[in-house]
Image (cartoon, rainbow, N blue to C red):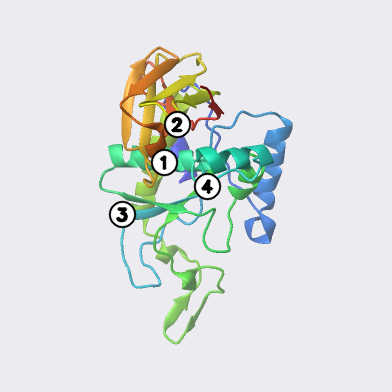
Amino acid sequence: MILEAARVLSKYQFENSIIYVGLSGEEQGLYGGKGLAQHAKEEEWEIIGIMNNDMIGNITGVDGVISNRDFRIFSEPAPPTETKKERKTRRFYGGEVDGISRQLARYVHKNVKTYMPEMNPMMIYRLDRFGRGGHHRPFNDAGFAGIRIMEAHENYTQQHQDIRTENGINYGDVLAHVNFDYAKKLTAVNAINLASIAWAPPAPKEVKIGGIVEPAAKLKWSKVEGAVGYKIYWRNTTSPTWDHSRYVGDITEYTLDGIVIDNFFFGIASVGANGHESLVVFPNGIFR
């Protein structure tokens, strides 16, 4: 997947850098991810997001389900690096499921629904599979947005197994178990989102919200170099995706008349001249 995505996207020019990495030492303790995340912090990289692809070739699940359209996007709700003050703020203003990794997951989900509607991206509200981990976790630990993209229907007889046959079952991670048409689809999922993020302007660093006890939600945000406009997103508090949006042009303040702040969650994305959008930023400040 990495090699094919790099081959395709190498034909284009982007505003942001795309780094393709193969990381080792996952089974031994996520050593590859830890090393690169530490290097990124030391070098002060401005990482927009980490897309960890781990197991993207199987369509036949251990539960008997066979599907070449489903895939999962794992993301944790809030950064582990958040401060005590930030946790207290969430209690009163919301945002329990609106951390930077969750916004990256929503971004991927939206693009897949737009450009690959035949696919079924399943957003899983968890860092990784139950009690397990992947190479995006060290980046999350360092404060970066990171998600895991992988097959939806795993077969555990093909993971962490010596190659053998027992009771008529073939165990082991072998080439015969890889469905390359499915892997091709998930490669396209990655290429679409890598290109979209790399072509987009930066996200606003500051987004403030107001409108307490008022009949309208008010938003202010910091201006972004390279953006030609901004889009306000909002959704019901129980919705997993940004379901409503309004493009408001090249301004840094807007009032959503008739939309009560208590009933929705809100966010802001920058929009470039090419139409590509940044990740949505959940409000990180309050004004009255």
Labels 4 & 3 near each other (Cβ < 8 A):
no
User: Which residue position is annotated with label 4?
Assistant: 77
**Is label 3 in contact with label 2 (beta carbons under 8 Å)?**
no
Cα separation, mark 1 vs mark 3, equals 18 Å
The numbered mark, 4 or 3, whose residue comes first in the sequence reads 3
Q: Which residue is mark 2?
A: 280
Identify residue type, mark 4.
Pro
Where is residue 196 shown, x and y percent of the image?
Answer: 41, 30
Looking at the rendered image, the disc whose residue lies closer to the viewer, 1 or 3, is: 1
Tag in front: 3 or 2 = 2
Across and down, in percent, residue 269 comes to 43, 26
Q: Earlier in the sequence, mark 4 or mark 2?
A: 4
Which amino acid type is shown beneath numbered disc 2? Val
As drawn, the residue found furthest toward the front would be 213
Residue 128 percent location from the top left of the image: 53, 56
Q: Which residue is under mark 1?
A: 106
- How much space separates mark 4 and mark 1, taking CA atoms? 12 Å
Can you tell which mark lies on residue 69? 3
Q: Earlier in the sequence, mark 1 or mark 3?
A: 3
* Mark 4 vs mark 3: in front: 4
Query: Mark 2–mark 1 contact, CB under 8 Å?
Result: yes
For the residues bearing labels 4 and 2, Cβ distance under 8 angstroms: no
CA separation, marks 3 and 2? Answer: 26 Å
